Each structure stands twice: as C-alpha cells, then as structure tokens.
Amino acid sequence: MSGADSARMVRRIRTLIDTAALDCHCRSKVGDALQRFMDQEQQRLDRHHLLEARQQRTAIAALLDLLADLEEISWSEGDRSVFPELANLFDDIAQQAQRGAEALRSIRTQMI
C-alpha cells in the first residue's frame, strides 16, 4: 500500500467515524489509533525509500567496478565498440543516482 493509498483509506475511515454516533471518548480513541496507524505507515514508507536508496548505491558501486576497465583502454583502442559500452555505464550510473536521489527525497523531512 502506498502512502497515498493509506491516506485515502484513513480519510474514508475518519469520514465514517465522523458520521457514526460515537461518544466523544470513543471517537478520540479511534482518532488516536488512526493517527498511530498513519505514523507507522509513514515509517514503513520511509524505511522502504531508504532501502531503495541503498540498493541504488550498491548498483552504482557495481557499475563503477565495471568502469575500472576504462583505465586499461587507450584512445587508440582497436575495438571502438568499447567506448559506447562504457558511455552506457555512465548513463546507467546517472539513472541509478537519480533513482536514489528521488528515494531519499521521498523520506519525510520531519519526525512527528
């Protein structure tokens, strides 16, 4: 369940609770429980985003290992196909870095 899905679900539950004939004490307890659920859901999503960023870092490290071959290649390399292949590695690193940055930006900036 995504964060947006959880928020929609909690809004729907809150609407049902608001229309139900609950005493104030019970309504408060349910509201507190829903807030705890939302906090836990946000924590789950934050952990997921951090894990995603770490996975992107691992992928970048593996790609950097492959780029080590660049040190052994001369500008006069006979197999010219190696240059576009290495360029693709740089493109892949950029994509992984973008995904990692997006994941980190998705983590909420303030703790409740």
Image (cartoon, rainbow, N blue to C red):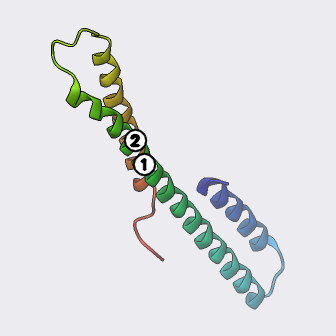
For numbered disc 2, what is the local secondary structure?
helix
Left or right? Give the position of 36 relative to 53. Answer: right
At a point 66% along the width and 82% down the height, the residue shown is: 32
At a point 63% along the width and 77% down the height, the residue shown is: 36
Residue located beneath label 1 in the image: 58
Instruction: Name the residue type under label 2.
Output: Ala
Residue 20, by quadrant, is: bottom right
At a point 55% along the width and 58% down the height, the residue shown is: 48
Mark 1 surroundings within 10 Å by alpha-carbon count, few (fewer than 14), some (14 through 19), many (20 or more): few
Cα separation, mark 2 vs mark 1, equals 6 Å
Q: In front here: 42 or 67?
A: 67
At a point 32% along the width and 39% down the height, the residue shown is: 64
Q: In front here: 74 or 9?
A: 74
**Where residue 62 is drawn, which disc sits there?**
2
67 to 54, vertically: above or below: above
57 to 72, vertically: above or below: below
Instruction: Name the residue type under label 1.
Output: Thr
Q: Position of residue 39 (x, y in %)?
A: 58, 72
The quadrant of the rendering that contains the N terminus is: bottom right
Residue 76, by quadrant, is: top left
Q: Do callouts 2 and 1 mark residues in contact (Cβ within 8 Å)?
A: yes
For numbered disc 1, what is the local secondary structure?
helix
Q: Position of residue 18 (x, y in %)?
A: 74, 73
Q: Residue furthest right?
A: 21
